[in-house]
Amino acid sequence: MRKVTILGAGPAGSSAAIQLLKAGHQVTIIDRVKFPRHAPGETLHPGVEPLLKQLGVWEEIRNANFLRHTGIENTSNGIGTFEAYNEEESWKGFQLFREEFDNILLKKAIELGAAFKPNITPSGLIMNGEHIKAVKTAENVYEADYFVDATGKRAWLATEMGVEYKRIGSQKIAYFGYVKDASLNPINPIIEWDENGWTWIAQVKDNQTAWVRLDLDEHRKMDNNWIPPKLRDGRSTGTRKAVDVTWRIAGQCSIGNCFLVGDASFVLDPGSSHGVLKAIMSGMMAAHLMEQTGTHSMAKVHQHYNSWVRNQFNHDIEKLMEMYEKYEIKTNANNV
Ligand SMILES: Cc1cc2nc3c(=O)[nH]c(=O)nc-3n(C[C@H](O)[C@H](O)[C@H](O)COP(=O)(O)OP(=O)(O)OC[C@H]3O[C@@H](n4cnc5c(N)ncnc54)[C@H](O)[C@@H]3O)c2cc1C
């Protein structure tokens, strides 16, 4: 049995925790906020379903009655094309509220025995060479055999360890918000292309629509009150937020006794549309590789995880670039 401390209780952290607990390890999860907490990222690709079954949360997900959709409506120059996930088997994705979804995963980890420490901000690391000995917080010191950085875009652990990120292409800021009572509330998400980028519109609850705007013209400033023209007959709920989604990848995603998972390992703009799926996959993969350290050298494990993450990143960048080229949008991503 090994002791593992996971920072971050999003889908990456909870998935790693569930797999580790199922394998008999001792897990502590620390998050800087209380749960449930809000996060953007409501559209889940159907490919998430087998992973949720493997994690043992399928019953809970089904009982939550999240909205399901069968594909994406792509609109360019006023012409819409529906892209079904899979016409023959009517493969379905999810439209959901992340606070509910992330809480289901976290609850499963707690049920399996994880110690969850919410509302705690780590203050530093105690190192032993390249290995982390412990994470310090104001109240405690968390020692472990392995550490997982699942802190999302903040990548707190990686930053503390001095891991550098390679940034690709121009800076990309995604804006997002929510609207109630709009006459447009589509179950199948709509992605609308224009000369500067795209706008994503999707129903997340009966009477609530989520939107995301990514403008690839770096010099254009978004008006503070901007909402998609198609949703202007509704009313905005909460404040519009902005997130840096510049494409980036950690120089090393597995280092010493630490694994970087989810957005802490790499970030792509939401146009790639499967950040949550990737977060779950990487959490599960890191847990699986920690199991392998009994039979394989740590160097081999590092090599495997780093190339696994890099291959996914490169594959997704290629797909994103193809997509942007198709709609004649410049990404300035010639330094891949
Ligand atoms: C506008 C927008 C729209 C998106 N839309 C989609 C979508 O439709 N579909 C999709 O699949 N993906 C989408 N994504 C991407 C998706 O949100 C992320 O890929 C996903 O949340 C990554 O999960 P994670 O577990 O790595 O990190 P997160 O979900 O960000 O979780 C990280 C956790 O770490 C905690 N934390 C942070 N710092 C610390 C610290 N120092 N110590 C302890 N805990 C810490 C946070 O509180 C948080 O709970 C979108 C992203 C954006 C910005």
Image: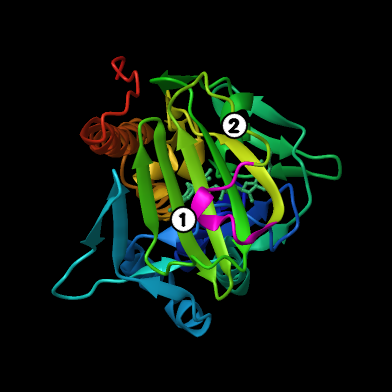
Q: Residue 283: x and y, percent?
A: 45, 51
Residue toward you, 222 or 62: 222
Tag 1 or tag 2, which sits nearer the N-term?
A: 1
Q: Are marks 2 and 1 in contact (CB under 8 Å)?
A: no
Residue 147, horizontal then vertical, whole percent: 56, 42
In the rendered view, tell whether residue 292 sits above or below residue 330: below
Find residue 201 and name its label.
1
Q: Give the color scheme: rainbow, by chain, secondary structure or one colour.
A: rainbow
| Numbered label attached to residue 249 | none
Q: Amino acid at mark 2?
A: Met
Q: Left or right of 312: which side holds 57?
A: right
Answer with left or right where residue 220 lies relative to residue 328: right
Q: Nearer the viewer, residue 201 or 69?
A: 201
Residue farthest right in this picture? 139
Task: Answer few, some or many: residues within 10 Å of disc 2's Cα (few below 14, many 20 plus, some between 14 and 19).
Answer: few
Q: Based on the picture, tell me whether residue 231 belongs to the magenta stretch.
A: yes
Q: Residue at x 13, y 74 (%)?
A: 88
Q: Is residue 84 left or right of residue 196?
A: left
Asked whether 74 falls inside the magenta stretch, the response is no
Q: Quadrant of residue 49?
A: bottom left
Residue 247 drawn at (x, y percent): 42, 29
Q: Tell me if residue 87 can be seen.
A: yes
Residue 265 appears in view: no
Left or right: 134 as drawn, with respect to 66: right
**The magenta segment:** 226-236
What residue did someone put label 2 on?
Answer: 222
